[in-house]
Image (tube, grey):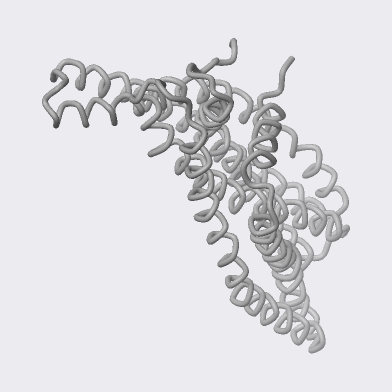
Amino acid sequence: MRLRTAETLSLAARFYRRYLWNWDVTAGFLAALVAFVLRAYASGSLIPLSITNIVNYLEQDNGHGLRRAILMLAASAVIFSATEWLFRPFWASIARGIANIKARLISGAPRGQDPSDLVGRLASDVDFVMWNVGGMYTTFVPNLLTALVATATVWQLSEPMGVVTVAALPISLLILEPYLAGVERARTVERRYYSELVHRLEERLKGTASDEDFVRSVRMWEKGMVRQVHYDRFYWSLSLLYGYALPATLAVMGVGEVRARRLSIGALAGALYALFSVFPPLVNALWGLCVLGQSVVPMRRIMEMSEGRQEVKATAL
């Protein structure tokens, strides 16, 4: 059985090596990664533990716990504010990557290729892929890191709740895999006819194409987009149920632990906050892979263009 997630990541890695493997772009990605790690530590560990310290202070009147909590919250504020500047080189590298890829493709484009498809690949596909790559990276990586750090925090505060949390993480793939398969089919239609639509519009304005040709391209593009809207709703309806039902279930478990005197109220409060830094961020992280999955078809179109092929070879489904 093929895992769409693995195929999508493999294609993205090949695209990165072919078009973005240089120090300028890599430095931008590394700068963003530093910001993600620091923010994950703040939101997944410092904030939940500060809540634990505050509740314990209210219960036990422990002044040291309150001071620790205030320092943790202050450190989190500094981390989130200061790391924003680390995204400047990242987004600048994305814009530079768009320009470099377009220049590379147009210089190596074979003569005589269908202009309706060539225009779409240069005018739309490159931008679509690169901004989606940027969006995927800034969605997937920070949310995944936050979810992992928060999982460790839950385990630290309550080992039984931590075990259940870890066991529930792979369930998310059962939602992701069908989405990636469906959205690839939808984007195959949408990207093909978007390219054609750009060309037909130019021809129509010049008076060399009929209204029927233009309308046909519009309707086929619409068909692909409507299919994607369906798959988007499929993902979000199930993933939001997953993201919020599991913390609620674990909250019941945590209350039982408190009543059995195996867990303090402060630890439960911190664990509950941490749980909402595990599952909703995990849902958002996987949405980053969904966004990348939407880019599979245009990535292939760009790579095939640089190899001199004229037709998209869709994966057999």
User: Furthest-top residue in view?
Assistant: 316
Residue 273 visible in the picture: no
Residue under the point 25% across and 24% down: 218
Q: Position of residue 118 (x, y in %)?
A: 40, 28
Instruction: Give the quarter of the figure containing the C terminus.
Output: top right
Quadrant in which residue 172 is drawn: top right
Q: Position of residue 127 (x, y in %)?
A: 45, 43
**Looking at the image, how many numbered discs can be counted on the residues?**
0
Residue under the point 71% across and 23% down: 3
Residue under the point 68% across and 52% down: 22
Left or right of 120: which side holds 15?
Answer: right
Q: Position of residue 100 (x, y in %)?
A: 53, 48
Q: Nearer the viewer, residue 304 or 242?
A: 304
Left or right of 97: which side holds 4?
Answer: right
Left or right of 194: which side holds 208?
Answer: left
Residue 258 visible in the picture: yes
User: Furthest-left residue in view?
Assistant: 207
Instruction: Give the quarter of the figure containing the N terminus.
Output: top right
Q: Position of residue 163 (x, y in %)?
A: 85, 44
Task: Using the image, determine if residue 117 lies above or below residue 9.
Answer: above
Residue under the point 20% across and 22% down: 214
Q: Nearer the viewer, residue 141 or 277?
A: 141
Q: Nearer the viewer, residue 127 or 199?
A: 199
Task: Using the image, determine if residue 150 lies above or below residue 299.
Answer: below
Task: Using the image, determine if residue 273 lies above or below residue 131.
Answer: below
